[in-house]
Image (spheres, helix red, strand yellow):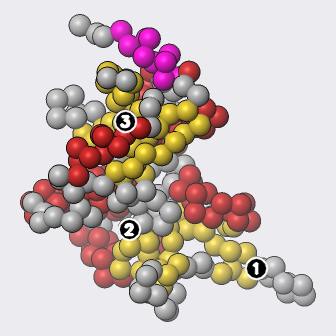
Amino acid sequence: MAIDNTFMIKKLQRLEEMSVVFSQFTRMPFVECDHETFDDQIHIFSDETKIQEFAKSYLKDKILLAGVKVPEGQKKPFLSSLYSIGVNAVMFHDRDSVTRIQLRDLVQRPDIESLSKEKIPVINPSLQLSAIYFIQELRRPIEHDKVQLHDLEEEMISDFAKSRFIMGLEVLREEGDSKDKIRIPYVKDKAENIFQPIFSDFSEFQKHYKQKAKEMKLAPLTIAQLPAYLIAESKGFVINPSGFNLPLSKNQIEMIINTFQDLVPES
């Protein structure tokens, strides 16, 4: 028997401000797979003070969570963005009640199939979701279940192999030159190692480069094309540096190409 959640849907939609549970390991919404429904879901609270109690219940498992406020003007864009990370349900915490709401009942689902055919990946939900699950587990300071972690990693790597990525290129225009010069950007980790940013989708690209993104040239690349863009000083690539921030070394990239070559899309 279907449950009528109309009242709670409208209540969530009318909130002046909502608080979303984020993972401190990914800097993204904390995602869980429900053991009964298999929904990939996030948690939204009407009262931010309730998040502290919720977060404490996860500390015993070394899962670090925090609340992030989403004002009314950003609510709809935020909810729409959940499709890009593979989320399909929201657990709405209001006072002492918790209501599961399907994402499609809150915001319209984009035509993901047509978007996935674009040369420039507009969204990449399978890759984002598998990476979120892997990193949420990997970065927990515990002794991991090696089988579980291996399974999560293998699913993520398989999605890496299937995906197209965005690389941003800086176009340098100098007076007197007949041709534009192209510069490949890089970032440094805490140890000063150089990595080159690549992105799972356009929103992650914009999140990282902000206003600068408008001036950059976009290069859509498969994983097999990445080695050709490595600069001499680079240790490899970092995927979504302003999101889950996952580095991949040259050797790891070559391993994925060799092991999953049947999954890599045509250039």
Residue 199 picture location, percent across and down: 50, 62
Q: Residue furthest bottom?
A: 232
Q: Quadrant of residue 16?
A: top right
User: Residue at point 31% right, 82% down?
Assistant: 251
3D distance between C-alphas at marks 1 and 3? 50 Å
- Which residue is under mark 1? 172
Between discs 3 and 2, the one toward the N terminus: 3
Residue 140 painted magenta: no
Nearest to the observer: residue 233 or residue 4: 4
3D distance between C-alphas at marks 2 and 1? 28 Å
Q: Are marks 2 and 1 in contact (CB under 8 Å)?
A: no
Horizontal side of residue 20 vs 160, given as left or right: right
Q: Which amino acid is tagged 3?
A: Lys
Residue 239 picture location, percent across and down: 44, 66
Q: Magenta segment, which residues?
A: 4-13
3D distance between C-alphas at marks 3 and 2? 31 Å
Neighbours of disc 3 within 10 Å: few (<14), some (14-19), many (20+): some
Asked whether residue 100 appears in the rendered view, the answer is no
User: Residue at point 50% right, 16% down?
Assistant: 10
Neighbours of disc 2 within 10 Å: few (<14), some (14-19), many (20+): some
Say what secondary structure mark 3 lies in. Answer: helix
Say what secondary structure mark 1 lies in. Answer: strand
Horizontal side of residue 261 vs 167, given as left or right: left
Between discs 1 and 3, the one toward the N terminus: 3
- Which residue is under mark 2? 246
Asked whether residue 177 appears in the rendered view, the answer is yes
- Which residue is under mark 3? 50
User: Residue at point 49% right, 92% down?
Assistant: 232
Relative vertical location of residue 144 with respect to residue 80 in this rendering, above or below: below
Quadrant of the drawing holding the N terminus: top left
